[in-house]
Image (spheres, helix red, strand yellow):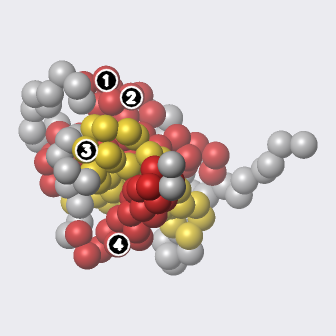
Amino acid sequence: MPKTFERYNELDVYTDGGCRGNPGPSASGFVIMTADEQIVEEGGKFLGHTTNNQAEYQAVVLALEAAKKYGKPKLNVYLDSQLVVNQLNGIYRLKSKDLYPIHQRIKELAKEFPGVVFTHVMREYNSLADAQVNLVLDFEEHKNASK
């Protein structure tokens, strides 16, 4: 029997991407929360060898895909990458051909919600998503060291 998920009118989404070396082993992480800071979902994914910006963008994709399970909420997406926020908001032009498909995927996913707002936050306000990135990277590092 399929799992049913609670529906929300609005959610706060924190995303982060990181790599050890740039480019290097990278991961994306996210945390989805209610307005009263109750965690709805958190997760991360190992991406292999990519750049930091690719990991930042992939984190947004992961989070938007996860948020679809909770109905059609308005999303407040918080990132500590000012560059990515400004590119997603159309303030800065996207110059990287490698990022273009991911950027387009985010724009497509955003259309599935009544509103998506991308906001820059200082790194210290994004610690939960950063922790997801580091959990994934530490796990991969440990797994590879065991081989």
Q: Which mark is residue 105?
A: 2
- Quarter the N terminus occupies: top right
Q: What residue would you read off at disc 1?
A: 101
Residue at x-position 52% and y-position 40%: 65
Disc 1 residue type (three-letter)? Pro
Location of residue 132 with respect to 17 vertically, above or below:
below
> Is residue 128 at least partly visible in the picture?
yes
Q: Residue furthest front?
A: 147
The answer to which quarter of the image holds residue 145 is bottom left
At mark 2, the secondary structure is: helix
Q: What residue would you read off at disc 3?
A: 24
Q: From the viewer's perspective, tell me whether residue 38 is left or right of residue 57.
A: right
Residue at x-position 11% and y-position 41%: 91
The answer to which quarter of the image holds residue 55 is top left
Location of residue 46 with respect to 106 vertically, above or below:
below
At mark 4, the secondary structure is: helix
At mark 1, the secondary structure is: helix
Q: Are marks 2 and 1 in contact (CB under 8 Å)?
A: yes
- Residue 15 in percent (x, y) is at 37, 56
Instruction: Calculate the distance from the C-alpha at mark 2 to the C-alpha at mark 4.
Output: 25 Å
Disc 4 residue type (three-letter)? Ser
Q: From the viewer's perspective, tell me whether residue 130 is left or right of residue 136.
A: left
Q: What residue would you read off at disc 4?
A: 127
Q: Nearer the viewer, mark 4 or mark 3?
A: 3
- Residue 48 in percent (x, y) is at 38, 39
